[in-house]
Image: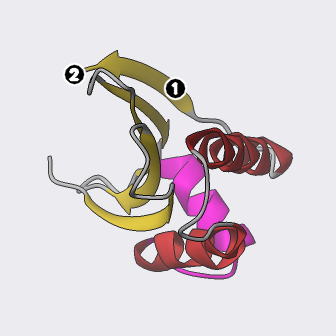
Amino acid sequence: MLTDYLLIVSSHEDLDVWSTIEVGIDDFKCMDMHLEFVDSSDQKHHTHATLDRENTAALAKKLKTDVAHLPDAIDEEFGNLGNSMLLPSQVEAIFQEMLEYILDHGLHYRLKRSLR
């Protein structure tokens, strides 16, 4: 399963630690919000919040867009919160706001964390 992601925000690239948020739609029309955090030992921490097909379609409808353009709608809503001078903790706070946004729309997601 291949997911093309759109970068929403990232932390300042000159820091020893950094974070990014990307949003994509997979082959099954499920939305995945991906937070990646790289710590000072270069260990990558991944958090995925995935909406199933029904919740993805419902969010697209609430945002008056189609599923394929949902990452762009999320970028319009949250991409302007970031700039190239963000700290990783600020990126993580934006991710938390995105999760709350999903819940505020009465939708649900599955959260998965991993280390690589």
Which element is circle 2 on?
Answer: loop
In the image, the segment drawn in magenta is: 53-67
Residue 8 falls left or right of residue 90: left
> Residue 1, image x and y in percent?
14, 46
Q: Is residue 59 visible?
A: yes
Q: Residues within 10 Å of mark 1 (few under 14, many from 20)?
A: some
Residue 56 colored magenta?
A: yes
Q: Which is more N-terminal, label 2 or label 1?
A: 1
Residue at point 34% right, 18% down?
A: 114
The quarter of the displayed image where residue 16 is located:
top left
- Residue 83 versus residue 100: which sits nearer the camera? 83
Query: On the image, numbered disc 1 is attached to which residue?
Result: 111
Residue at point 60% right, 48% down?
A: 87
Q: Amino acid at mark 2?
A: Arg
Mark 1 to mark 2 CA distance (whole Å): 17 Å
Query: On the image, numbered disc 2 is attached to which residue?
Result: 116
Q: Residues within 10 Å of mark 2 (few under 14, many from 20)?
A: few
Residue at point 42% right, 56% down?
A: 22
> Residue 50, image x and y in percent?
47, 39
> Residue 100, image x and y in percent?
78, 42
